[in-house]
Image (cartoon, helix red, strand yellow):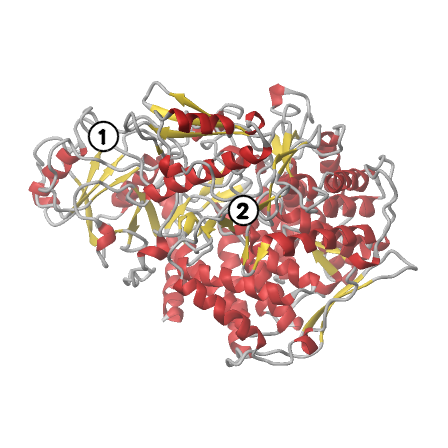
Amino acid sequence: MYLATILPTTTMPAVLFSLMLLGALCSLGQAMSREERHRLRNQVVEMFDHAYQNYMDHAYPADELMPLTCRGRVRGLEPSRGDVDDALGKFSLTLIDTLDTLVLLNKTTEFEAAVRRVLSDVRLDNDIVVSVFETNIRVLGGLLGGHSMAVMLKEGGQHMQWYQDELLHMAKDLGFRLLPAFNTSSGLPYPRVNLKFGVRGPETRTGTETDTCTACAGTIILEFAALSRFTGEPVFEAHARRALDFLWEKRQRNSNLVGTTINIHSGEWVRRDSGVGAGIDSYYEYLLKAYILLGDDVFLQRFNIHYASIMKYISQPPLLLDVHIHKPLLPARTWMDSLLAFFPGLQVLKGDIRPAIETHEMLYQVTKKHNFLPEAFTTDFRVHWAQHPLRPEFAESTYFLYKATGDPYYLEAGRTILDNLNRFARVPCGFAAMKDVRTGSHEDRMDSFFLAEMFKYLFLLFADAEDLPFDVEDYVFTTEAHLLPLSLSTGPHSSSIPSNRTSKEELDDSNFDWTCPNTRLLFPDPAYPRNLREPIRSAVDKSCPRPAPYREPGMGHPPLRAQDFMANNPEHLELLRRMGVSLIHLKDGRVQLVQHATQAVSAVAAEDGVRFMQDMMELSSQQQKEQLPPRAIQIVSHPFFGRVVLTAGPAQFGIDLSKSSTGLRGFATVAEPYSGCSEITNAEYVRGHIALLQRGQCMFAEKARHIQKAGAIGGIVIDDNEGSSSDTAPLFQMAGDGRSTDDITMPLLFLFHKEGNILLEALKEYREVEVLLSDKARDRGVDVQEVEEDCLTEATTPTSFEPIGQSQMSTLEVDELAPEQVTPSQQEVSPVEQDTSPAEEVTPPEEEGSPAEDVRPPEDEATEADLTRPKEERDSEDREEPQGDTDPSSQSVDELLADWREDLEAFQQMEKDEL
């Protein structure tokens, strides 16, 4: 098997880190043949080519590819997505992020061409505000990884002989552009910086933030230290070390845990929940890897102290649950986010194999239930947040576990990842993120980390040593999977910035595990990994009921339960006051609950208030089960073959598609009149077809009755609000007209303008377009899959409320349905959606929310969750206004479908392979 070994040295700062092959540990199942591994390796390369070439053909020099509309995402020209867009700096992000992937996959010629493009086309002095965290790990890391590869190839004497450290010069320029963010009294960086003007105040949306996430401030050291040692400029490493020192000093001394969000000026924890997922994850990763890369024993000591606390409080094998840093026995939430999937891989580097196997198995079983890891899922493995932006963390841990055990089981897990990407995420212009893993609907995004990380780990999983152009054991992977050479441990470094350390830290030998356990001796039974996995697989398979709410030992029950609360009960209102929770009646009939933890009568009462707010969120989630989830419209005819899936809103009348195992399949046609508000004049064309209608002029139920009378078998209503999209607006349900709708016996679905335009453009190009209306997307052959049990696909509604500490305020809105009782509302309570008549109410369905940060851990958290306005309004207040035409129809259908025909042969071959 492989053994992760960390060897200390007292005579030189270099650290030797290697994964040594000692033997082979095989499961009781049959090992994968060499030929099959090579087939999967080649499939990884083909998939990478599909994604990379479509980015270069349709998006470059834009930062990212929009794979559904086959164009580039340019910041300011597309509707704002909030903080997610802070990763985009008009610097060809995907190309830079992909440089070292090209080399690893033996695409040396493409790498050389890509480097020349970066040097000639990319500018780093744009007047644009970017995330310090994202720019560091993606762009600075990408430039340094590219430089490392260029130097390696040049030294080989065959390629890049013209290279004169140009990428390193760009990295140094970028490093200096990021440095102004570190101009704080604590040394923690501001979360954002203007590439051209630095941190200069409100006009650039920089310099006014007070909070940042722990990972945002603690995931700097690898890139900045590498930059210092490559260039001889010590200032970068010094600033990164200072930030890490400050975070270490501010850890909670009893639990030795850190919170999720910290005030960059005072050092007070703003969010005191602690875990290994979003907001903290890569802080722990970089402590261990900083020791590996730099050879500083202090980093290993800190990591081991943190790790012991993680295993004591957060790890509940196979679960990893957030806790409060001051009361680590008190869980902070009942769900987990997908970013924690990296942790089994980190445990492999640590040498703690058993919990890595257990947690990975739990993640694998969740993946097999939903095809992908949902962005968040509950402790009983239900969907909590339904998105999946093609994250690579699970593939990363799969690769490291295979290296550590040699168990072919992890090759099969890798095959599952490949198959699901090809079956559910692959589209003609690349790979599209999943908007909802329950329905299989897509989102028009392909993040740069998909190319930077996913294909590296999958290629390494299936490749032999002779397939690699260099020895990966000579490098350390950054959190973005960029490759930094271990030889940097001998590079020059010194500090010109005062350290935050109050005194010289003594190194306690008890906090060092110098050499990881020899798992060949620890696991003499080849069935050992399988025996660990089996009970976890059974637990996930059988899970359905929710566990009983946690009650802190000795605390008894909370003084007030959410389901018992009545707004007109003076005793209840007094209990809320004591817990720091106040109640505000809004003009539109809703009630807003606001918690000021600092106004509670005691710390215990404040914790009770936190639990009450969490219970209210849980109650809200349970009530959402009664709402209809989103539906899917899948284009199944030539040349789409089911590879384009559109997110659709359901109706509260007509056939319930969730109760149909096959959905409704038929050819689409435009009804006349398009509004559908009077008798259909082209009934001969509508009969037996799915009618397309435009929203407006009459009620939804009236439209349904008119097309049903004309003989339609179903209907799709397309929004008349130009530019609307399910990417930026919450879906809603189409309600009836105030009278019985039992006469409507066909399904009716709703599409926003952007998604509807894709369907209309296809109809213009191809006279016959067949679609499948269903509760979730079917396999790409549009074969019906077995419907999952309700208890396994049930979702809860996310909310911007998070468990908080004493210094944080949170709000929660609820609907005031009756004078006596208050029940929780949706996350975003918006005005009633209707077509034209006040009688037609439309209520929002389960809305797939997202974490505070969609792509990476949140860089800053609002201390008040203002739910009185839609999230889009809040996100856009401090951001650049979108400019230019964002209508997808501005691109001709010829451009949209240009490459689709070219892919048909490959698609058909892939379908044969799957069969």
Q: Residue at x 51, y 72 (%)?
A: 39
Residue 668 as seen in the image, left or right of residue 863: left
Would you say residue 148 is visible in this rendering?
Answer: no
| Cα distance between the residues tagged 1 and 2 | 43 Å
Of residues 419 and 627, the one drawn nearer to the viewer in this rendering: 627
Question: Which secondary structure lies at badge 2?
Answer: loop
Badge 1 crowding class, 10 Å Cα cut-off, few under 14, some 14 to 19, many 20 or more, is: some
Residue 258 as seen in the image, left or right of residue 361: right
Mark number for residue 552? Answer: 2
* Residue under label 1: 841
Of residues 315 and 391, the one drawn nearer to the viewer in this rendering: 315
Residue 806 image offset from top left, x and y in percent: 60, 32
Closest to the camera, between mark 1 and mark 2, is: 2
Would you say residue 492 is visible in this rendering?
Answer: yes
Q: Tell me the quadrant of the picture where the C terminus can be found.
A: bottom left
Residue 85 image offset from top left, x and y in percent: 53, 35
Q: Earlier in the sequence, mark 1 or mark 2?
A: 2
Q: In which image quadrant can residue 246 be found?
A: top right
Q: Tell me the quadrant of the picture where the N terminus can be found.
A: bottom right
Q: Residue at x 73, y 29 (%)?
A: 180
The amino acid type found where label 2 is placed reads Glu
Q: Residue at x 49, y 29 (%)?
A: 875
Residue 32 as seen in the image, left or right of residue 122: left
Badge 2 crowding class, 10 Å Cα cut-off, few under 14, some 14 to 19, many 20 or more, is: few
Residue 789 image offset from top left, x and y in percent: 31, 59
Residue 889 as seen in the image, left or right of residue 551: left
Of residues 557 and 681, the one drawn nearer to the viewer in this rendering: 557
The amino acid type found where label 1 is placed reads Glu
Q: In which image quadrant can residue 848 be found?
A: top left
Question: Which secondary structure lies at badge 1?
Answer: loop
Residue 609 image offset from top left, x and y in percent: 50, 34
Mark number for residue 195? Answer: none
